[in-house]
Amino acid sequence: MAIMTWIILLIIFLIVELLTAGLTTIWFAGGALVALILAALGLSVAWQLAAFFVVSFLLLFFTRPFVLKYIKPGKEKTNYEGAIGKQVLVTEKIDNLQGTGTADLEGLEWTARMSDDRATLEKGMFGEVVAVQGVKLILKPVEPEEKENV
């Protein structure tokens, strides 16, 4: 009976993995496979459960960061990634300590903050996008290259 349970769980985990866009249950499918092998070898249910949880955790903990970093299933590049390195025009004074600031990036107004909390940019100045955090542009001060690029 334990063999059938592990086969069913393995199939369920694999089906869920196939139906989802990201890596969600493949780690548990690996644990179920090891538990299935132990069940076929005649080990007790306690050993099977322990192996399922240990293998699932180890796969999740050690392989997931590598897979997400190098494979990135379902990750689509968005237009914000192209914002890094671009110059933007400050439309409201950027002051991290006051929590203020907006900038215009290609005709769209974004909330903006400085990469250095001590730095500020006044309205009409230019900044370079060094990162995007959520819906905020993170800027460093720069001299404008050409006004047409803004």
Image (cartoon, rainbow, N blue to C red):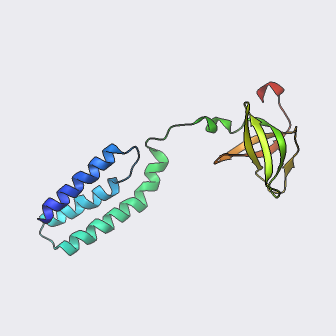
Q: Quadrant of residue 35?
A: bottom left
Q: Position of residue 11 (x, y in %)?
A: 22, 51
Image point (27%, 49%), residue name: 14
Quadrant location, the C terminus: top right
Q: Is 16 placed left or right of 101 in the picture?
A: left
In the shown orientation, is residue 98 left or right of residue 40? right
Report x, y in % for residue 76.
Answer: 50, 37
Q: Residue 126 falls in which quadrant of the image?
A: top right
Q: Is residue 70 left or right of residue 102?
A: left
| Residue 19 picture location, percent across and down | 33, 44
Residue 123 placement (x, y as % from top left): 87, 41
Closer-to-camera residue (111/118): 111
Q: Nearer the viewer, residue 12 or 148?
A: 12
Give me the residue at 19% from left, 56% from top. Answer: 8
Camera-side residue of 34 and 45: 45
Examine the image and state in which quarter residue 31 appears.
bottom left
| Residue 12 vertical position relative to residue 81 in the rendered view, above or below | below
State how many labels appear.
0
Where is 137 relative to 79, above or below?
below
Q: Residue at x 37, y 65 (%)?
A: 57
> Which quadrant is home to the N terminus?
bottom left
